[in-house]
Image (cartoon, helix red, strand yellow):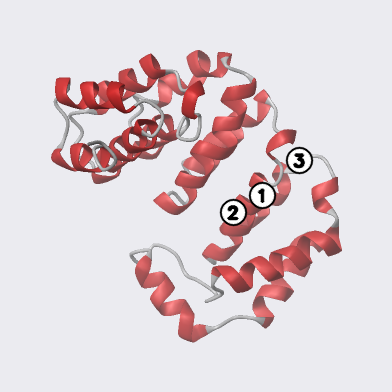
Amino acid sequence: MSSNIALLTQLFEENRNEANAEPMKKYMKDHFPFLGIKKPQRSVLEKQFFQETGILKEPFNQDLIRELWAKEEREYQYTALVYMEKSLNKLEKTDLPFMEQLITTKSWWDTVDAIAPKPVGKIAEKFPEVVAETINGWANDDNLWLRRAALLFQLKYKGKTNEELLYQYIQQNADSKEFFIQKAIGWVLREYSKTNPTSVKGFIEGTKLAPLSVREGSKYLA
């Protein structure tokens, strides 16, 4: 264990709360154990961790994230996500395969929904060629989390959204029976409707989508 991870482990263990841990685990459908550290307190501890280690002033560190991802309790993965969000401007094209590893390891919506629109979205914005090289393949992958990530990587693009690509990915996944795919379609349509409501309204009306996707995607439409 690196000294950085040892420090974070010490901070987290000192604040372990078993009373919180069980309901947090239940909320995540018992997929992961928790230390029981809720986000406000975790943010305070993370701030101390980042200040004492100075890692945010250093180059982007994949090994740090790998160590956090290997830890049992879910809070460590959440800290990895915070670290990535604070390091977005350091990301390079070569970090995309690493993001794919994270998406497909210990997968659930809580991690995938942070990785897709933030680090993946940032990399694709800086290096648009990765869409054709990599993300197009995700949209048809057998792994549902990669497909969800492909749908969501433009979530925060607003006026920069490649509408044709967005609708293409949705159409490729429109017949999916997977809840997390249907939900992602609705979510990204709802978000894009804030930018181009007319286009989204026309797309929903002209495309056969799951009722969940239509309901979610139409929330902001008149």
Amino acid type at mark 1: Ile
**Residue tagged 1:** 65
Q: Secondary structure at mark 1?
A: helix
Residue at image coords 49%, 41% = 103
Residue at image coords 19%, 37% = 214
Report the mark closest to the observer, 3 or 1.
Answer: 3
Amino acid type at mark 2: Trp
| The N terminus, quarter of image | bottom right
Q: CA gap, disc 1 to disc 2?
A: 6 Å
Asked if marks 2 and 3 touch (Cβ < 8 Å), the reply is no
Instruction: Estimate how packed mark 2 is, as few (under 14), some (14 to 19) or many (20 or more) residues with alpha carbons within 10 Å.
Output: many
Instruction: Estimate how packed mark 3 is, as few (under 14), some (14 to 19) or many (20 or more) residues with alpha carbons within 10 Å.
Output: many
Residue 27 in percent (x, y) is at 36, 68
Q: Is residue 108 at least partly visible in the picture?
A: no
Q: CA gap, disc 3 to disc 1?
A: 10 Å
**Residue tagged 3:** 60
| Along the line of sight, the residue nearer the viewer: 65 or 206 | 206
Q: CA gap, disc 2 to disc 3?
A: 15 Å
| Along the line of sight, the residue nearer the viewer: 174 or 204 | 204
Amino acid type at mark 3: Phe
Give the numbered dot on residue 69.
2
Asked if marks 1 and 2 touch (Cβ < 8 Å), the reply is yes
Report the mark closest to the observer, 2 or 3.
Answer: 3
**Relative vertical location of residue 17 with respect to residue 88 in this rendering, above or below:** below
Residue 196 in percent (x, y) is at 36, 25
| Along the line of sight, the residue nearer the viewer: 201 or 23 | 201
